[in-house]
Image: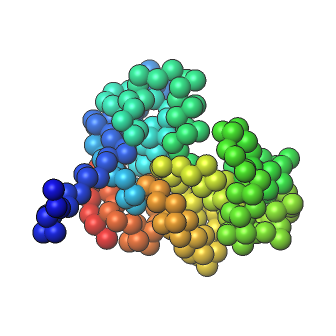
Amino acid sequence: MTANPRAIAIEAPVRELVVCEQVSRRLRSGSATLTVLDRVDLRVKEREFVAIVGHSGSGKSTLLGLMGALDEASEGRVVIDGVALGSLDESARARLRREKLGFVFQDFQLLGNLTARENVLLPLELNGVPDAARRTDQLLERVGLGARKHHYPSQLSGGEQQRVALARAFAPRPAILLADEPTGNLDTQTGSGVLDLLLELRSGHGSTLIVVTHDDRIAARADRWLRLESGRVVEEGRS
């Protein structure tokens, strides 16, 4: 049978990689209960870049921690690439973090007793990635640190440390990258360069990106954004 040249191709629907349904997080504070997150809904599609903005204490980092399987919701449901986090034990949560997620933190969180190269190489070796050393060197070249890969974090500037952290985060090719104030400890010029690099790496790897920030300039570069106040979503928009 001859194919119809006028047949219309049907595109597969874009998957939702992150789903938060009525997610709340409550903590005990003495005899009182503190509500950090209050019934938050969020759905993030494959390859989407979403910014979560808000002042300090708004609950945005707590929400990121729940999506990163670093903490557990008091109520509601968090689903990562079809897997409900509430159904996992700690071993399975750790495996999901290794296989699905990449993290970038405000304070870099590099291991001080390892060189830049060793910091990037470590997650690849833990995951048993073939040709890990070659991929590590390629990524460090890509972030402009090929000549400084044998330096320890204490020998690197803040911007250089965050570039190492970016290389480490993208090394396992995560489906989802979670960034918590990735430019918060950097001056404006250095932070702008790190953000440019983050978005370039994300585009090249096709990762879904969720960034927590208090900087509206970062939100302006996202596909869409939502604003938290006192643990609730109060505003959403598209850039």
Q: Residue at x 33, y 39 (%)?
A: 20
Q: Is residue 191 toward the left or the right of residue 158 in the image? A: left
Number of numbered markers: 0
Whether residue 56 is visible to the viewer of this picture, yes or no, is: no
Q: Is residue 218 toward the left or the right of residue 114 in the image? A: left
Q: Is residue 14 toward the left or the right of residue 58 in the image? A: left
- Locate the C terminus and report the quarter of the image it occupies: bottom left
Q: Which residue occupies the foreground of this view, 67 or 3?
A: 3
Q: Is residue 161 toward the left or the right of residue 175 in the image? A: right
The quadrant where residue 73 appears: top left
Residue 98: give x, y in percent of width and height.
Answer: 59, 39
- Locate the N terminus and report the quarter of the image it occupies: bottom left
Q: Residue at x 66, y 39 (%)?
A: 127
Q: Is residue 62 above or below residue 45?
A: above
Q: Residue at x 28, y 66 (%)?
A: 238
Whether residue 143 is visible to the viewer of this picture, yes or no, is: yes
Q: Which residue occupies the foreground of this view, 61 or 198?
A: 198
**Furthest residue toward front:** 1
How was the colour assigned to the protein in this rendering? Answer: rainbow
Residue 168: give x, y in percent of width and height.
Answer: 67, 53
Residue 69: give x, y in percent of width and height.
Answer: 49, 35
Q: Is residue 137 above or below residue 46?
A: below
Q: Residue at x 38, y 71 (%)?
A: 220
Residue 131: give x, y in percent of width and height.
Answer: 72, 51
